[in-house]
Amino acid sequence: MRIIDLRSDTVTQPTPAMRRAMADAEVGDDVFGEDPTVGRLEEIAAECTGKEAALFVVSGTMANLVSSLTHCGRGDEMILGDQSHIFFYEQGGTAALGGIHPRIIPNQPDGKLNLEDIEAAIRSDNIHFPVTRVIALENTHNRCNGSPLDAEYMRSVGQIARKQGLKIHLDGARIFNAAVALETDVRELTRDADSVSFCLSKGLAAPAGSLVCGSKEFIARARRNRKVVGGGMRQAGVLAAAGILAMTEMAERLSQDHFHARKLAEGLANIKGISADPEKVKTNIVFFEITRGNLTAQTLSGQLNSEGVRMLPLDPFRLRAVTHYHITSDDIEYVMKIFAGILK
Ligand code: TLP
């Protein structure tokens, strides 16, 4: 059966060039700081995000956790969105493992946090309150239609943070998608963040790995925190070799994924029983809703799956489809035929 897997861009497989680079990678013990390929990956990541230094970690979740542990002590507060990945999908790890108190404010449909909401959430100096340390943003915003946050917005949050002596952590799991969609440089989007995490293993197609980027001093402390959560890897250059190609060769083509996502949303918008808004699709993530009363997201995804089309039912009547390296225009047309068949 023809399988079209739109559950996530995490399903991407390493390219033939990545597999060759992995086989040939020069490696060493990275906990001793002796893996030259990891060193090169970290240098490129720092350069790409305009930061002094970078740290290779296992996953996006570990990148966010290590960054949060580095910004906050136990009982300190982090301001973050109610739809953010850190709040929604990371088991509350910052609280469970770091004792960090989450201060949740609503994400707007475009993934932003209202500036007034951020300002109102910052604690004053009062013996009853936790101490606010950090504001966490997400770019692109996964649960908010994969929306990219623009540089001007980042600057506005940066101004608030600096005025109040707070730090900004940017979960930039898909920051390259944001830069491509906004036709800007990644550095424009990361300038106002004190720490940035991004993933190699999503649209960029590397098999594993994320980076935390920040000042030399921040990364030195983050390196200690990576070790305590069990993230010290040894001959990790095998993975870093694929990551280098992910960063240097796979970013530009993301515009194709964005084009395909838009096509998919346009097709879905024309199907009776489905509500989709192509205007909201700026990157590679498409959310759509079922408007036919007797059908749930779970049932629809089961029906699609039995025809070889995989999508994620994320809410009772809402599904997500993510385009990526292995999805072609022809696949999108095929998916539309399957939908038309199921919902006829
Ligand atoms: N997101 C995954 C799932 O966890 C939902 C996906 O399929 O989209 N930040 C953001 C914004 C993410 O979307 C993800 C992964 C992560 C962090 C965590 O990355 P990993 O999966 O590497 O721990």
Image (spheres, grey):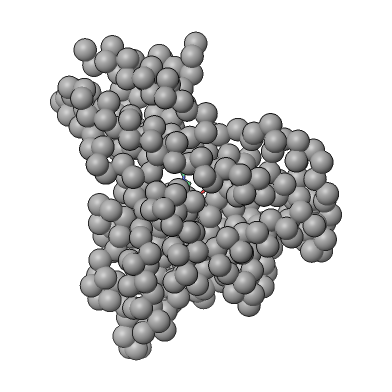
Q: Is residue 133 left or right of residue 42?
A: left
Residue 199 is situated, as x and y percent measured from the top left of the image, at 55, 50
Residue at the image position 49 percent from the left and 51 percent from the top: 176
Question: The C terminus lies in which quarter of the figure?
Answer: top left
Above or below: residue 321 compared with residue 185: above
Q: Is residue 147 visible?
A: yes
Residue 69 is situated, as x and y percent measured from the top left of the image, at 54, 68
Q: Is residue 90 visible?
A: no
Q: Closest to the observer: 262 or 231? A: 262
Give the mark count: 0
Residue at the image position 43 percent from the left and 57 percent from the top: 184
- Please tell me in which quadrant of the rendered image residue 208 appears: top right
Residue at the image position 26 percent from the left and 27 percent from the top: 268
Q: Closest to the observer: 251 or 319? A: 251
Q: Closest to the observer: 190 or 27? A: 190
Above or below: residue 159 compared with residue 242: below
Q: In this view, which residue lies farthest toward the front?
A: 183
Above or below: residue 229 compared with residue 268: below
Residue 3 is situated, as x and y percent measured from the top left of the image, at 48, 18
